[in-house]
Amino acid sequence: MTLLLTADAAAAAGGGMGQMILMLVLMFAVLYFLMIRPENKRKKKTEEMRNSLSVGDEIVTIGGITGKIVQVTEETITFETGEDRVRIQAKKWSVSTTAKMEAAEAEAKNKKRK
């Protein structure tokens, strides 16, 4: 009789461990699809945008400076800010958004609302 009870207790403990592992795997999957994957997509999209910068694009830097690109090199861009034609040279990684990107995001939001 005692042997039967201990066998049942061992089987119940093993089943509990399997459920715990399953829950951990499910929690990781949820975290991956809700947090990690969207962030990787956002990073990839931003990197593609920075690599496709060209002369004439309207940009906004991470510091909030806006302007129009007048020269693009491998690592840097030069852009003019406003009518006084002040030229600023910055690294490509400092570009936050472009006018094209902002327009596309606004259009996507409008489509979702309708």
Image: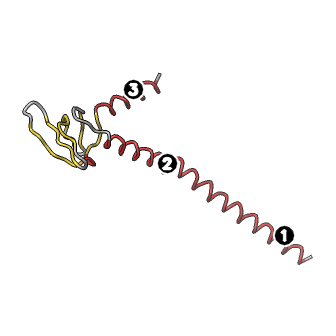
User: Which residue in the rendered view is the most extreme toward the left?
Assistant: 84
**Which mark, by number, is residue 37?**
2
**Within-10-Å neighbours for mark 2: few <14, some 14–19, many 20+:** few
What's the CA distance linking mark 2 and mark 1?
42 Å
Q: Quick one: quadrant of the N terminus? A: bottom right
The three-letter code of the residue at mark 3 reads Glu
Q: Which residue is mark 3?
A: 107
Question: Which of marks 1 and 3 precedes in the sequence?
Answer: 1
At horizontal 53% and vertical 51% (from top left) the residue drawn is 32
**Which mark, by number, is residue 8?**
1
What's the CA distance linking mark 3 and mark 1?
61 Å
Q: Nearer the viewer, mark 2 or mark 1?
A: 2
**Within-10-Å neighbours for mark 3: few <14, some 14–19, many 20+:** few
Question: Are the two marked residues, 2 and 1, in contact with CB atoms closer than 8 angstroms?
Answer: no
> Where's residue 73, x and y in %?
22, 45
**Within-10-Å neighbours for mark 1: few <14, some 14–19, many 20+:** few
Residue 35 as seen in the image, left or right of residue 51: right
Question: Which of marks 1 and 2 precedes in the sequence?
Answer: 1
The three-letter code of the residue at mark 2 reads Arg
Question: Which of marks 3 and 2 precedes in the sequence?
Answer: 2
The three-letter code of the residue at mark 1 reads Asp
Q: Provide the secondary structure element on which disc 3 rests.
A: helix
Question: Are the two marked residues, 3 and 1, in contact with CB atoms closer than 8 angstroms?
Answer: no
Q: Provide the secondary structure element on which disc 2 rests.
A: helix
In the picture shown, does residue 91 fall above or below 85? below
Q: Provide the secondary structure element on which disc 1 rests.
A: helix
> Where's residue 3, x and y in %?
89, 77
